[in-house]
Amino acid sequence: MIKLIKEVPLWNNGYVQQYDFSEANSSEESRIEHVCAVARVCRGDKTPVKSDKKLYRQLLTEHDGKCSSVFEFVPTWKSTLNRDLTFTHQSIFGVRVSISMSYTTVLSNLRAMLSDEEDYYNECPQEGFFVFKVKVPQMIVKHILRHRMLSFQEMSERTNKLREYYYCDELYELYMRLQKRNCLKQIDQYDGNLWNELIYRTAQCEFDGDQQQLKIRQELLNKGSHGIAYTTLWIAGWRQDKSGWDNFFAVRTKKPAQREVIELANTIKQMMEE
C-alpha cells in the first residue's frame, strides 16, 4: 500500500525519497504496513521482522503504555460541523431562524489521537501530509531535528554500525592524502569502497590536522568519521502547519545554513511543489 512517489539522488550515496501516506489510516492493514515501514528504519531496514502485526502491537504500548512516535507518520483528520443560529424576525406567528453551517477540520496524527483515547479511520485521504525518507550525513541531522514541529524517525546507532561515508569534491585532497598515508595504490578518481575504508581508519586528531592544512570546512571534519557517516531518517508533517515545513524552508534554504542542509531543504521543497 505504501507508494513511492519520487526519488532524487543527493551527493555520492545520499537520496531523498517522497512517499504517499495519505491512505495510511484507511484501514487496520494499512496502519500496520505504514507504521512498521517507518519503524524498520531504526534497525537499518535490512533486519527482518518476523511479524508486522506483532511489531505493531508492541509499538502501540512501547512508551510506558503509550504508543511509539512512529504513529506520528499516520495522518488523521476530523471535521466538526458548526451551526450558527441567527434570529432574523419575530412576530405574533413566531420566530424566523436563519441557520448557517460550516465545517472545522482538525489535522493531526494517529499518535495524538490515540493519546486522547480517540480511535477512528479516515477512508478518504486528506491532502497536505508530506512524508520523506532521506539518507544524509550525520553532521546535518541535528540541524534537521531542531525543527521540532515535524515528525522524525532515525536509524538507531545502538543496533547499527554507520560505516558508509559522505564524500564531496572538497574532500578530494584529503582522499589522496589518506591513500598515501595508508600506502595504498594511487588512483585519480574517487572510489566509494576505498573512501569508506580510509575514513574508518582515520583518527580524530588526523582529521583536525588535515582540516587546518587543507583548509577544509570545519563542519565537514569537526565530528570525525561519525560526522560524515550516512544515516537514514523519515521526516513528515502537514504542509498546512506553518510552524512545520514553512519554518524548515525559511531557515534551511539559505545561508548561513550549511551547504548540504541548503541542498537537502531545496530538494524537498521542489519535490513538494511538484
Image (tube, helix red, strand yellow):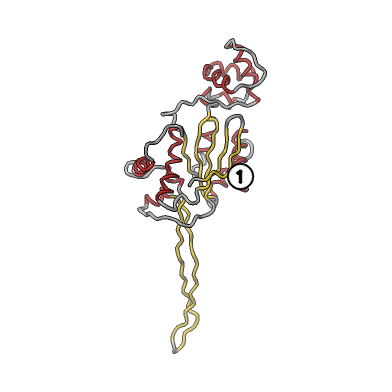
- Horizontal placement of 26 versus 273: left or right? left
Considering every residue shown, the one lying at the far right of the view is: 188
Q: Nearer the viewer, residue 23 or 269?
A: 23
Outermost left residue? 65
| Disc 1 crowd, CA 10 A, few/some/many (<14, 14-19, 20+) | some
Q: How many marks?
A: 1
Q: Residue furthest bottom?
A: 92
Q: Position of residue 206 (x, y in %)?
A: 56, 16
The amino acid on which the numbered mark 1 sits, given as a three-letter code, is Met
Helix, strand or loop for disc 1: helix
- Residue 66 percent coordinates (x, y): 35, 45
- Nearest the camera: 91 or 180? 180
For the point 43% across and 44% down, which residue is it? 33
Q: Is 234 placed left or right of 64 in the picture?
A: right
Q: Quadrant of residue 13?
A: top right
| Vertical relation: 223 (above or below) 88 | above
Residue 250 in percent (x, y) is at 60, 44
Residue at 61 percent of width and 44 percent of height: 271
- Residue situated furthest top in the rendering: 183
Q: Quadrant of residue 18?
A: top right
Left or right, residue 270 beside residue 124: right
Residue 254, how many percent across, how many down? 64, 39
- Residue at (45, 66) in percent of width and height: 81
Q: Is residue 258 visible?
A: no
Q: Is residue 37 visible?
A: yes
- Vertical placement of residue 128 versus 84, above or below: above
Name the residue beneath numbered marker 1.
271
